[in-house]
Image (cartoon, rainbow, N blue to C red):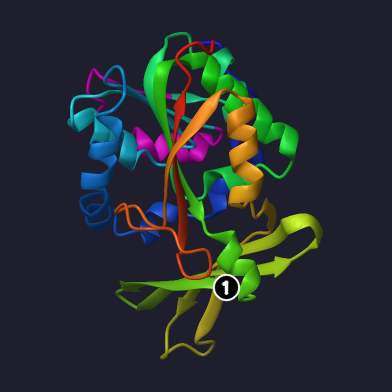
């Protein structure tokens, strides 16, 4: 395997935030499954790349549906969690940067997904251009690309400074996942995911378990669509959630975009 930029555990920013713990994955997969399958059935072959796969739940689901699935992520910590259970023969995880798919992906795929706000971790326009160009190179002609990020048109317009709290009950209290946002120039966001421990019987009822700071870029439709088109993709549909609902700029919580690689591109 020709890996992309390797992330060593000590430098892995995602080692300090256990996202898997705060997502009700069975319920989420059940909710998203009909739309995912409907879109991916349009692909020219039953193979899919999961860009920024994290702990691999979507990749495992699609492998279970009969797709040849490849999950790619830059975080060794996330990929270690993704591989805690044995992998079926049609599922693989690789370490690498999604901007350099050609370094880790040697085969052609029928589709690609990027779910869970992955693309906003790319803060420079040229990084997005590299992702879309690399993706066009590894997708089959008429391949499908489905991605979901938060709807930053709504977030900026309504000055939303935090995402919904997540709670998990433990024997001696609760774990609370807090995600704070501070707006910077040019759509950039200072993002602070923090895990708190709440125990009402302790001397200090609230403790910070872990916290980190990173920068995001709140990409919007007007940013993304021209870059996709420049890479040879056409836009098939735009939705406001992973159930295929309509996109309302001021109200939808998500921006979900379905694109298709041109038949003669790459």
Q: Is residue 246 visible?
A: yes
> Residue 115, percent across and down?
43, 44
Q: Identify the residue shown where x is 61% and y is 24%.
A: 231
Q: Identify the residue shown where x is 66% and y is 26%.
A: 130
Q: Identify the residue shown where x is 34% and y is 32%.
A: 83
Image quadrant in which you'd find residue 152: bottom right
The residue segment tinted magenta is: 74-93
Q: Is residue 85 visible?
A: no
Question: What is the tally of numbered marks visible in this picture?
Answer: 1
What residue occupies the far right of the structure in this picture?
185
Which residue matches tag 1?
A: 162
Q: Is residue 76 magenta?
A: yes
> Residue 40, percent across and down?
29, 32
197 in relation to 204, above or below? above
Q: Identify the residue shown where x is 38% and y is 52%.
A: 20
Q: Foreground: 66 or 135?
A: 135
Q: Foreground: 85 or 127?
A: 127
Side (left or right) of 209 relative to 172: right
> Residue 248, percent across and down?
46, 64
| SS class, disc 1 | strand
Image quarter of the C terminus: top right
Q: Is residue 185 magenta?
A: no
Local packing at callout 1 (Cα closer than 10 Å; few below 14, some 14-19, many 20+) is some
131 in relation to 148, above or below? above
> Residue 232, percent across and down?
56, 23
196 in relation to 188, above or below? below
Side (left or right) of 55 relative to 62: right
Q: Foreground: 262 or 187?
A: 262
């Amino acid at each position: 395997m020709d890996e992309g930029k390797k992330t060593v555990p000590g430098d892995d920013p995602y080692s300090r935030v256990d996202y898997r713990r705060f997502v009700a994955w069975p319920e989420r997969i059940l909710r998203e499954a009909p739309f995912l399958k409907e879109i991916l059935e349009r692909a020219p072959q039953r193979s899919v790349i999961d860009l920024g796969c994290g702990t691999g739940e979507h990749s495992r689901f699609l492998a279970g549906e009969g797709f040849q699935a490849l999950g790619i992520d830059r975080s060794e910590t996330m990929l270690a969690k993704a591989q805690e259970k044995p992998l079926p023969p049609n599922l693989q995880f690789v370490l690498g940067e999604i901007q350099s798919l050609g370094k880790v992906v040697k085969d052609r795929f029928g589709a690609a997904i990027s779910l869970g706000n992955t693309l906003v971790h790319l803060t420079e326009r040229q990084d997005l251009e590299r992702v879309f160009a690399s993706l066009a190179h590894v997708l089959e002609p008429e391949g499908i690309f489905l991605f979901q990020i938060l709807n930053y048109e709504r977030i900026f317009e309504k000055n939303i400074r935090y995402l919904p709290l997540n709670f998990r009950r433990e024997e001696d209290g609760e774990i609370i996942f807090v995600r704070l946002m501070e707006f910077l120039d040019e759509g950039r966001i200072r993002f602070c995911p923090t895990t708190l421990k709440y125990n009402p019987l302790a001397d200090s009822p609230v403790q910070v378990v872990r916290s980190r700071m990173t920068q995001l870029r709140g990409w919007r439709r007007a940013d993304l669509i021209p870059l996709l088109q420049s890479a040879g993709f056409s836009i098939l549909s735009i939705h406001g959630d992973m159930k295929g609902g309509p996109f309302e700029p001021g109200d939808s919580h998500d921006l979900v975009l379905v694109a298709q690689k041109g038949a003669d591109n790459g």
